Image (tube, rainbow, N blue to C red):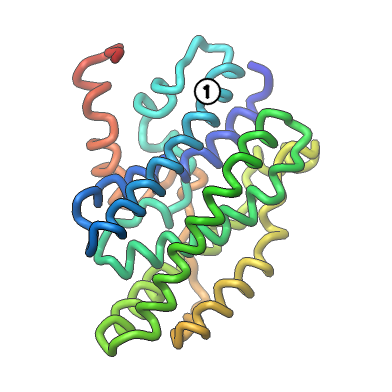
Amino acid sequence: MKSEHLYNYILGIADNSLILGQRLGELCGHGPSLETDIAGTNISLDLIGQTRSYYQYAAKISGENKTEDDIAFLRLERHYKNVLLVEQPNTHFGYVMGRQYLFDVFHLLLLQELQFSKDETLAAIAKKGIKEVSYHKRFSGDWIKRLGDGTPESTAKMQEAIDDLWPYTQELFDMTAADTAMAQKGIGVDVSKLKESYYKEVTDLCELATLKVPQIAYFSRGGKKGVHSEHMGYLLADLQYMQRTYPNMQW
């Protein structure tokens, strides 16, 4: 293997996009309007497309004759390194947009730094993804404002979503051993340095949307270390079904 830290670093980024893409894919055909439904599906496809690029690179450096499908579909739950935020269920549309926006702000900040990576492959993936993720953030942010500063019901639901999802945000900035090793080599991003910019941007938008920013001391974390919520197993059961039912299948 070229680098165990590099391999794990790539998974740490890619797993977020895979799991969030899967969550959005569950909503295909269930959007509140045709335009919104198609937009959500396109965002899902963007995320999974980015995931493929990361996994192809990870498979190449793994030294284990793996494919992108092996990495996506044949790992155990504890081996996925995504943050808890992206695996939260599609409770209602406000939740979906709240989850999306809280991740999109971080995702764009990450890619804007990753594009300067000394690893040419990661830099290329980041540069390509910035345009897509910029749209994702604009789309989800517009819905936060629209729902937050809308009717009493939409405001209440959007506030509920922000309150419930906020405790998952600090994990975005936790540094794993792989994160630290890659940041020191100029390959990865020190995400802890993105925290201030992230919370300022999110707070500003919440205030614009007439939403109260949660004031809490406790934050949930563990996903980066493979300790996931109760929702993750059900998500993987759907995601992995075909590959585990028909091993080594190929289209």
The part of the image, by quadrant, that contains residue 157 is bottom left
The answer to which of 93 and 198 lies nearer the viewer is 93
| SS at circle 1 | helix
Q: Residues within 10 Å of mark 1 (few under 14, many from 20)?
A: some
* Residue positioned 46% across, 83% down in the render: 209
Callout 1 amino acid: Gln
Q: Quadrant of the N terminus?
A: top right
Q: Where in the figure is residue 122, as x and y percent of width and height? A: 66, 34
Q: Quadrant of the C terminus?
A: top left
57 to the left or right of 89: right
Q: Where in the figure is residue 88, as x and y percent of width and height? A: 34, 56
Q: Where in the figure is residue 146, as x and y percent of width and height? A: 38, 78
**Residue behind mark 1:** 56
* Residue positioned 50% across, 37% down in the render: 50
Residue 217 against residue 20 in the figure, above or below: below
Residue 12 against residue 170 in the figure, above or below: above
Tell me how many marks there are: 1
The part of the image, by quadrant, that contains residue 126 is top right
Does the image show residue 181?
A: no
Residue 13 against residue 8 in the figure, above or below: below
* Residue positioned 45% across, 88% down in the render: 210
The answer to which of 37 and 219 lies nearer the viewer is 37
129 to the left or right of 250: right
